[in-house]
Image (tube, grey):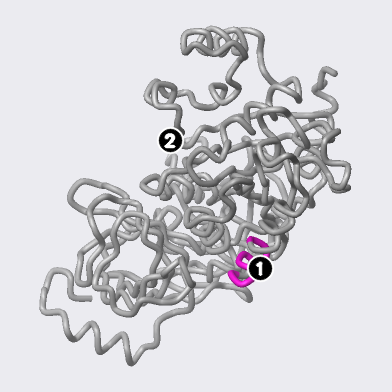
Amino acid sequence: MTTTAEQLSATTLLRFATAGSVDDGKSTLVGRLLHDSKSVLTDQLEAVEQASLNRGQEAPDLALLTDGLRAEREQGITIDVAYRYFATTRRRFILADTPGHVQYTRNMVTGASTAELAVVLVDARNGVVEQTRRHAAVAALLRVPHVVLAVNKMDLVDYAEPVFASIAEEFTAYAASLGVPEITAIPISALAGDNVVEPSAHMDWYGGPTVLEHLETVPVSHDLTACHARFPVQYVIRPQSAEHPDYRGYAGQIAAGVFRVGESVSVLPSGRTTTITGIDALGESVDIAWAPQSVTLRLADDIDISRGDLIAPADDAPPVTQDVEATVCHVADQPLSVGQRVLLKHTTRTVKAIVKDIPSRLTLDDLSQHPAPGQLVANDIGRVVVRTAEPLALDPYEDSRRTGSFLLIDPADGTTLSAGMAGAAFAGAAAEAVVAADDDAEWDF
């Protein structure tokens, strides 16, 4: 069935990511999903068929639909995050196929950071392994609201219900202990197509939805208009032309919530309060704007505002702090160490910062905290304490995935070091103690 423009306009959008251990069949599942939902162009399918023949395979290898890099096709693995866009009559999808190798766990952070659902694959022959637990932990830390456990390769265990039930019970208990709010287990065979798009004739003991059916019906909870209103300033517009001699506007994308003309707002980190006198969107004046629209706000008072400032409702502004305690996933090959000088990028604001402490590193085997590791290496997940040179207006990540997240960047070459999820502001007395311990004048905040 062809999806019309009118049908698409009435459907919702679901962002989801796939993850799992090596050879669990992530790319094959995605390929099967695209193929069986009629979301593959003819020339794409022909290219996959030819590539499969070149590798000595008689049937098309559907994994090649997502393993787009030449190195991936040669090695038969996923290295980078592969994004695919497809749609059915019920919903539109943005899919991120993330790698399974341990050394590419950091790529899952990229793929899952904006996802509302994560599909974690498990090989029915191997069950829950370390990488499965690692991906479940990342999904929990990133506050992904829905997790699907896809127990793949059921055809290789004779579609045995006890095998599926045992794996589902173990994973559900582990994910629930991490705080994952919703877990759905589905037995599948991506290679044969069982329970991917069409129900399986080999597993009559399973009465739940197929993968596609679940993706089409799972509640989408990304209504940014229901969140705390936040507007990071990206650009100050001062045309100073004869036509608009006094125009002064603040342009950017609304990160969350709704803004209205006449609303009292605070400009952070200064804390100055003013009123919205106008909102310009696509060259037209409007009375209301909401996330994720890109607009220009006009304010009643001539306040000193620049790129990186945050505009928020006066009665619902986030706290301003220079001391941030956060959970980070370290993504760089070079380690992150106590005392290291970094740049912290939060929305449109980038400031100097120092890593004051690394209190713990998460041990994924038993979810214990390894105290005072001293540094984090690639793919580590740990707690950090960061002191910034300038105040930042951060929301806790659990309240806002958009304004509660940040990046730590190497100031020397711009390399992204860690992806952070802000927690509560660090206690003032403890902050003074760690600041006093640093004697570098240039970076002593």
Q: Measuring from the top left, give residue 389's x and y in whole percent.
A: 27, 70
Q: Which residues are magenta?
A: 171-178
Q: Measuring from the top left, give residue 177's x and y in whole percent.
A: 61, 72
Residue 418 versus residue 150: which sits nearer the camera? 150
Residue 111 versus residue 195: which sits nearer the camera? 195
Does the magenta portion include 98?
Answer: no
Residue 407 in view, yes or no: yes
Position of 117 with respect to 320 (left or right) is right
- In the image, farthest residue toward the front: 158
Does residue 169 lie above or below 49 as drawn?
below
Q: In the rendered structure, find residue 173 and report the number of the disc placed on it.
A: 1
Position of 195 with respect to 140 (left or right) is right
Label the magenta part by its dominant secondary structure: helix
**Secondary structure state at the residue bearing disc 2:** loop
**Residue at screen point 63% across, 76% down:** 315
**Residue at screen point 17% across, 84% down:** 437
Residue 368: which quarter of the image?
Answer: bottom left
**Residue at screen point 88% across, 47% down:** 207
Does residue 420 lie above or below 216 as drawn?
below
Q: In the rendered structure, find residue 80 and report the number of the disc placed on it.
A: 2
Q: Earlier in the sequence, mark 2 or mark 1?
A: 2
Does residue 107 lie above or below 7 as drawn?
below
Q: Amino acid at mark 2?
A: Asp
**Residue at screen point 59% across, 52% down:** 127
Does residue 432 lie above or below 181 as drawn?
below
Q: In the rendered structure, find residue 292 and report the number of the disc placed on it.
A: none
Q: Measuring from the top left, give residue 385's x and y in whole percent.
A: 34, 75
Residue 428: which quarter of the image?
Answer: bottom left
Does the magenta portion include 173?
Answer: yes
Dot 1: few (<14), some (14–19), or many (≥20) neighbours within 10 Å?
A: few
Q: Amino acid at mark 1?
A: Ala
The alpha-carbon separation of the residues under discs 2 and 1 comes to 30 Å
